[in-house]
Image (spheres, rainbow, N blue to C red):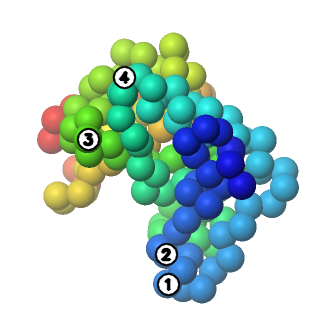
Amino acid sequence: MQLTQHFTLAELTKSSTAERLELDNTPPPQVLPALIQTAEMLERIRSTLGVPVTVTSGYRAWAVNKAVKGATTSDHAQGRAADIVAPRYGTPLQIARALAPLVDVLGIGQLIYERFGSTSWVHVSTRVPDKRVNRVITITSAGTQLGVQEV
């Protein structure tokens, strides 16, 4: 099912963890509107970056979210978030730095630059966090910092 011009439902629900553990990652019908909003946000990001955006993690059924040790309040489980990379644009750090000043314009509720070891990605969500100071943050194994930080 095509959600927007460049993003499909299959793309936003693909999960190697779900496949490996044979978990159903099919979103319930009530999550579909949130997935469409997420895909629309991803379209704006793609247009801004000027290159294709790859979703490395989108929707996660609760069992999948638990298996990846996601937060119990994860926006992924509500269809409101995606972890992305865009190698043709640059590193996730470069992507996060480009998008951070544009969160309002692009309809990004929260942007997180995440880095664990040599792996990094950008988490984007349509939901604005309760504490607006947490709107743009960096998360690493060392903890959470405000803004996009090189670690």
Local secondary structure at mark 3: loop
Local secondary structure at mark 2: helix
Residue positioned 54% across, 32% down in the render: 43
Quadrant of the rendering where the N terminus is positioned: bottom right
List the single residue furthest toward the front: 5
Amino acid type of the residue that numbered disc 4 sits on in the rendered structure = Ala
Tag 3 residue:
88
- Is residue 62 or residue 94 the one in the foreground? 94
Amino acid type of the residue that numbered disc 2 sits on in the rendered structure = Thr
Real-space CA distance between mark 1 and mark 4, rounded to the nearest whole angstrom: 34 Å
Residue positioned 77% across, 50% down in the render: 31
Mark toward the start of the polypeptide (2 vs 3)? 2
Any part of residue 61 in sight? yes
Local secondary structure at mark 4: helix
Tag 2 residue:
17
Local secondary structure at mark 1: helix
Query: Horizontally, is 93 left or right of 31 in the view?
Result: left
Badge nearest the viewer, 3 or 4: 3
Q: Quadrant of residue 52?
A: top left
Amino acid type of the residue that numbered disc 3 sits on in the rendered structure = Arg
Residue 100 is marked as: 4
Residue 47 is marked as: none
Real-space CA distance between mark 3 and mark 4, rounded to the nearest whole angstrom: 18 Å
Mark toward the start of the polypeptide (1 vs 3)? 1
Mark 2 vs 3: CB contact within 8 A: no
List the single residue furthest toward the right: 29
Q: Quadrant of residue 63?
A: bottom right
Amino acid type of the residue that numbered disc 1 sits on in the rendered structure = Arg
Badge nearest the viewer, 1 or 3: 3
Tag 1 residue:
20
Measured as percent of width and height from the top left, residue 151 is found at 15, 41
